[in-house]
Image (cartoon, rainbow, N blue to C red):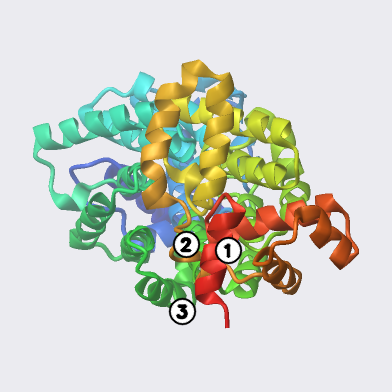
Amino acid sequence: MPIVEVPEGGDALRAASVQTLLRLEPGHGQPTARHLTLLAEVDPGPAPAVWTDARAGVLASILAARARRDALADGLALPQRYFEDGRLTRPASMSASTRSRLYASVSEYCSATGWPQIAARYAAESLLFAETDAQRYRAHSVHALALALNAEYIAAAAAIERAHALFTAHGWHDDDLSHCLCLGEAMLALTRADVGRLRELADALQRTPSDQPYWNFGAAVMRVAAHFFDRDLAAGLAESRRLLHASDRARSPRLQRDLLLGMHADMLALHGEFDEALAVLATGVTQPGHAVCFPMQRAATLLLTGREREVIESTNACVAMHDEHCLRTLTPLLTRRAVAFLRLGHPRRATQSMESAIELISRTGGSLMPFLMIPSADAARLLDLVADERGDLVETITAMRAALPALAARQSMSPALSPLSPAERELATLLRTDQTTAEIARARGVSVNTVKSQMRSIYSKLGVSRREEAVAILDVHSD
């Protein structure tokens, strides 16, 4: 995308900036596609000697336009030209309202680039300086999105409630609906596997008159998520393929495209198309903040194909990020690593990883997502291990157990959707005999530990925890 300096006396750009700033807050409809496109191509230049309302207003409109037009190539380097630790690096002489607008735009931009942790801090500053209810509504909206993306669900729900209260109190029109707020609500609905709310939000987005394609794209992504949770894989895959290959997909926000890519891969894996799922994920680029974490996404498919060592190796760098990693994607990553450690015969490390995940779930509001795509036998065993050591987490663990039937990989799906590898099929034949584990190891010329590891993988794919249960399923599905 060509970048041009803001010219002195550039009347068209100045008008676009003023009109866009006005429409970023409710009461005036949505910014026009023409103005957003124009502003997204503008380089706001270096920090001025002194910030004024006019200069800050131009930067606020450009940042919002870049977020909405997916002009994110500069990443965090753009706001870092002007801010350090949330503070402007040059003196400022501007009103509180302008500060609120500027911080809200920085927050929206940071969420779009995949840094919700940073976005949440700027949103809080925007709320601090807001002087009107329209500014408070926008501040709460961008704050809700950042918090939901970072798995701070209790705080996100509170921000959403405050934004809705302001919207209702002023009787603003549907044209003034905040796309950030809708996306934040969708992230909250995802954590609760709330299919009804996802469809309501999709309907709300499609009712909003707009000439901006990302509204309809966002609504379609929410419908794909609803299909996913309903396990209507045929409909979900058909719609996600259409969206991922649509001619205007590049005009949609990158964050939504990445979320869709991950869901598409998960549905392929549940459908038994493991190679295709991994090929799809190979096209995804994980941004530095890991708001969408493709190593975490890939780990689910690797577990379903018995490649536990790859799960650990491919996610070590994510764990090493510590508090820089987005919390929303960190909890399922820790859960998937726990499964891998358990199958590899490291129960202590599995318990530690699972314990960290459950602590985060308990602290941030009880997301169900970490158990999505995890075979139920593995999940139940890990919960047992943590419950034995952490009585203070029993309440959260109990809630997780109740959610497993709806979220974890279902036993009825396992034989069709998780085919055994050739080596596992060979072992499965021997499991149906009276041979002991040691006798099987000798017959195959491998160690007992190798046989045990492969047995754990077979049990996981079949959704069981004991040899007798596995044999019962293998008998039904044998040729």
Give above or below for 216 relative to 80: below
Query: How far apart in space, not on screen, are marks 3 and 2 (Cα)?
Result: 16 Å
Which one is in front, 99 or 430?
Answer: 430
Rendered-image quadrant of the N terminus = bottom right
| Residue 94 visible, this orientation | no
Per the image, label 3 sits on a secondary structure element best described as loop
Q: Which residue is drawn at 64% across and 56% down?
A: 303
Residue 110 in the image, given as x and y percentages of width and height: 52, 41
Which residue is disc 3 drawn over? 247
Q: Which amino acid does label 3 sit on?
A: Ser
First along the sequence among labels 1 and 2: 2
Q: Residue 260 carries which label?
A: 2
First along the sequence among labels 3 and 1: 3
Which residue is disc 1 drawn over? 471
Which one is in front, 374 or 190?
Answer: 374
Viewed as shown, does residue 207 lie left or right of 284? Answer: left
Q: Which amino acid does label 1 sit on?
A: Val
Residue 31 in the image, given as x and y percentages of width and height: 31, 54
